[in-house]
Image: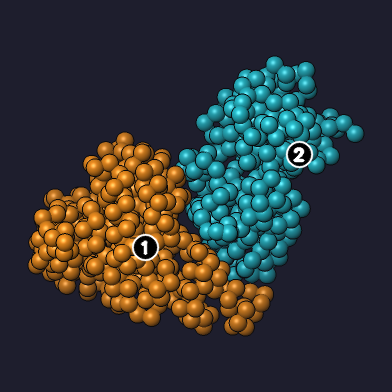
Amino acid sequence: MTLEDQVRGRKVMLHDMCLRDGMHSMRHQITLDQMIAVSTGLDAAGVPLIQVTHGDGLGGSSLNYGRGRHSDREYISAVASRMKNAVVSVLHVPGIGTLDELRMAADCGAGCVHVASHCTEADVTEQHIGLGRKLGMDTVGFLMMAHMTDVETLVSQALLMEGYGATTVYCVDSAGYMLPGDVTARIGALRAALRPETGIGFHGHHNLAMGVANSLAAVAAGATRIDGSAAGFGAGAGNTPLEVFAAVAERMGIETGVDVFRLMDVAEDCVLPMMARPPRADRDSLTLGYAGVYSTFLYNAKEAEQKYGLPARDLLVELGRLKMIGGQEDMIEDTALTMAKARGLIAAEA
Amino acid sequence: MSKIKCAIIGPGNIGTDLLYKLMRSDVLEPVWMVGVDPTSAGLARARELGLKTTENGVDGLLAHVLEDGVKIAFDATSAYVHPENSRKLNELGVLMIDLTPAAIGPLCVPPVNLARLAQDAVVNVNMVTCAGQATIPMVAAVSQVQPVDYAEIIATVASKSIGPGTRKNIDEFTRTTSAAVASVGGAKQGKAIVVINPAEPPLMMRDTVYCETADEPDRAAITASVRAMIAEVQKYVPGYRLKNGPTFEGRKVSIFLEVEGLGDFLPVYAGNLDIMTAAGARTAELFAQEMLDGTFKFRMAENA
């Protein structure tokens, strides 16, 4: 059976990430006007879910991840009040955001939450998934860096999230490391293990330029939600470019309900002009995908290169070797200091 | 020399590691281990080490408190059951050292405020969280030099060192730590971030402390204060080390720490558990010394 045969007629819900993952590329400095322009455009194009939060989720505004230009409350309120059909979603990482922040997001009009954990640590999400459900939100379990564990473990973690009440569970390729076969194995196993009514999502990054191909593999294996970003606006070499995926989906007979031309226009006219540098698989972004490193580490690694004259690629490879996971941005500076000292680039006392 | 008799509630990782530390103490003598599961490995281990045990929770201990002369109890259970445990034991005149994030008593980080707490009459002392024990001394080291507007800590712990209780209550863990970074550390505002890393072999506990000073940081004074505080913590956690920093960028001070445990019960990577039990034991020792000297004030009736 060809890929077309497998996916034809499937209904897939698209979820735009450019106002959350794109925050990384903008160091969390997107203005309210930009947020409103992009989100209303996406809404008009028929994108059903739009994520709006600091790049690291609720409560992410910090010295470690970068302070937001505005608070999550301001961003979510500004967007949610203007949506005609789209539902605003938020990212929530236990250990970074607290339950009070999730309540705030729901009060401001967010209707969906991605409760995220590293792919092996789902048991930290029980309180947050529970609260998301209690608040009546579309509650999603979001298993990050899913390439770092085996299929069986990923399934066991997804079952935990389903047990806590998540109605959709994601396989998240945070490093843009997976190849289509990796996606097929993971999504297929999740589909077989989770309840039939539980949705399955895939969130890709484009560091190896596999975002669209991986998302197609996910749909073929049973995924019902696909994350992407208009113009690929996101961490590393960007997320799966949503307008490209929507166009491919239409050609292949996948039903997304999205107006492809209008989505292209939002990408071209609203999102692209925001970017200082459009994401592409440059040397450092490609290294993320090649070495399996968390995509947002890119920015701190480039900063360390500027500060200490230490090549970002060397630093990223070392962070991969040390098995650093999402959230450990502080360890980039620490590792850079240690490496710079060892190479005589800075004094040993620093 | 006589010792102050203690009970440990919760025979899990924290309770068992604490037991090993108390057995080395000159002033504390662990006599009871309290659990709720008769098949618990922790209770069996405590029995082998000569302690009395009960699987009936704190209620199983109450009848023996007076006859066995228990004066200090450590609670290593959960934030949800702690308040009741504390109330029942306080009524019998037992000082409670709380290792859960319940935080109903004053927060204690030994090198920062133990001496001050010991001057007050207390019936319950809370040990914050492992992340708080590892980072608040550094926030205090900076705030003792000059005002800190904002302090943020990132604690990374090995997956194997974080038990089901903490995982289930990660929100309390994060919030209790954030609050203590400000109230005990001396920052105007505090924030805590916790990351659980499953790498194999397990990584050592790492902690990063960022402080934003109100004015330009006094680099020499802060560096000296940080080094002095590291030495203070090393008195009870020898594996507490400065890995990098302090570094300075504008008003931001960055301090990168590593905490290696003693390996009493859990492997050395679990510095987070070690610093918690070591801080609890150190706190109890100071109060025990006061009890032995006859200067300890237990003022339950007046507080109630």
Q: Colour of chain B?
A: cyan
Locate residue A147, reporting x and y percent.
39, 61
Residue at 62%, 61% in the rendered image: B257
Q: Which residue is mark 2?
A: B22
Outermost residue toward the right in this view: B1
Q: CA distance from mark 2 to mark 1?
A: 45 Å
Q: Nearer the viewer, residue A221 or B241?
A: A221
Badge 1: chain ID: A
Q: How is the image coloured?
A: by chain
Q: Quadrant of the N terminus of chain A?
A: bottom left
Q: Is residue B146 left or right of residue A204?
A: right
Task: Give the quadrant of residue A202.
Answer: bottom left
Rendered view: B165 above or below B33: below
Q: Is residue A337 left or right of residue A75?
A: right
Q: Which residue is mark 1?
A: A174
Tag 1: residue type? Answer: Ser
Q: Secondary structure at mark 1?
A: loop
Tag 2: residue type? Answer: Leu
Numbered circle sitting on residue B203? none
Residue B175 seen from this side: no
Q: Nearer the viewer, residue A283 or A17?
A: A283
Q: Nearer the viewer, residue A120 or B221?
A: A120
Locate residue B122, reporting x and y percent.
68, 31
Residue at 52%, 31% in the rendered image: B80
